Structures are given as structure tokens and as C-alpha cells.
Amino acid sequence: MYGVIFHFLRDYVIERHGGKDTWQALLEAQGYKFKMYFPVKDYPDEEIVALVQTASKALNVPVPDVLEDFGSYVGPALLDFYHMYIKGKDLATFDVIELAGSSIHDVIHAHNPNRKPPRLSAHRESADLLVIHYQSHRQLCPVVRGIVRGLGEKFGEKFDIHETQCMHDGADECIMRVSRQT
């Protein structure tokens, strides 16, 4: 997992779930007295899974709900972090998701061919309906749903998200139909 995600997880825990003491408690539960994640370094997926599972238990909230809430936090944060790839463009949620699935993802991951980014594509069926295809060995579809919601909040939009198929149910990919609420 790319280190920037750990960085955002830390910020998420600090901002939404009790501050630096909570983050430190999560690290200590994983056996770390101190741990720093560097944004451009890769870390084992198991580390973030363990942190999220520990957070889920501490909050008494199911893992998918923690992941979706994290996604709602990380969507706008990623937009700010990778602003150079969309600079000067007048965008809304659907535009950002379409760009993430094409040019942004490609540019970000071009510098490290060993990364295993998710496969993400999106197309509009109408002005108010976007269809997202997501496939990853990590199966983090709740994060994708959260990112859609978080970007919607950033741009003042609300969406209904209907997942028509999911990797957690044995499908090869998740398909999400995102309808703009009018």
C-alpha cells in the first residue's frame, strides 16, 4: 500500500477519532512504539488492514463502515494532494472520478512500475448517472463509495450509490451506479 494512504489514515484518526493519542494507541496495538509512514514508500497491505481492524474494534464499528468513512475523508484529501494533475480544470465529482480512473491514476503510478494500483474506470450513462468499475486484490470497495461521498460533499453534491456487483460476493470486479440526487 502506498505510504500516502497511511499518512491520510493517520490524519483521519487524529481529526475524526480522538487525536494523536488514538493514533498512538493504534500503533501500539500493532506493536509499534513509534512508526512513521513516508508518502512515496510502499508498505505491506497487512499493516493497513491491521490498523483498520484495530480501529474497528476500538470504535465498535464494522470494518466496511470504517473504510467508507475513511474514504469520505480521503477523497477530498487526495484531490488536494494530487492537485497538480487537475490544475486549472473546473471539475465536479463525476469529472474527478473519471480522471482518477484514467489519466491521474496512470501518471501517479508511472513512476513505480512495481505498484499494484486498483483498476478503476468510470463512464457516464447520463448527466446524473456515473458507472464505476473497480477491481483490486485489496477489495476496498467501501473506500471507493466513501470517496464518492466525500468528493460530493466537497463539491456540494449528493449521490445514491448502488453496487450491482461486488468482489466480496465473488464477482471479478465491483460495479457501482452513482446517481446524482436532484
Image: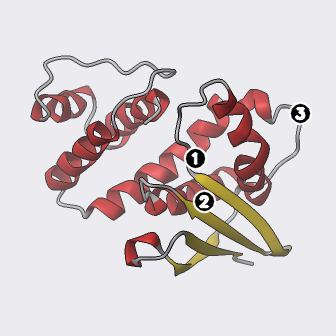
First reached walking from the N terminus: tag 3 or tag 1: 1
Q: Name the amino acid type tagged 1.
A: Gly
- Which image quarter holds the C terminus? bottom right
Element marked by disc 3: loop
Which residue is drawn at the image coordinates 45% and 70% (left, top)? 167
Calculate the distance from the C-alpha at mark 2 to the C-alpha at mark 3: 21 Å
Which residue is nearer to you in this view: 66 or 156?
Answer: 66
Which element carries disc 1, helix, strand or loop?
Answer: helix
Where, by quadrant of the figure, is residue 57 drawn? bottom left
Location of mark 1 (residue): 75
In the image, is 119 to the left or to the right of 29?
A: right
Determine contact: label 2, label 3, CB under 8 Å.
Answer: no
Q: Of marks 2 and 3, which one's residue comes earlier in the chain?
A: 3
Residue 21, compared with residue 163, is above or below; it is above
Mark 3 to mark 1: distance in Å? 19 Å
Q: Which residue is mark 2?
A: 148
Q: Nearer the viewer, residue 166 or 177?
A: 166
**Callout 2 touching callout 1 (CB < 8 Å):** yes
Residue 127 locus on image (x, y percent):
86, 73
Q: Give the residue at x 51% y 58%.
A: 146
- The relative height of residue 181 versus residue 142 in the rendered view (above or below) is below
The disc, 2 or 1, on the residue closer to the chain's N-terminal end is 1
The spot of residue 33 in percent (x, y) is 13, 18
> Residue type at mark 3?
Gly
Using the rendered view, name the quadrant where residue 161 is placed.
bottom right
Q: Could you classify mark 1 by the number of other residues whose Cα lies within 10 Å: few (under 14), some (14-19), or many (20 or more)?
A: many
Q: Which residue is mark 3?
A: 88
In the image, is 87 to the left or to the right of 23?
right
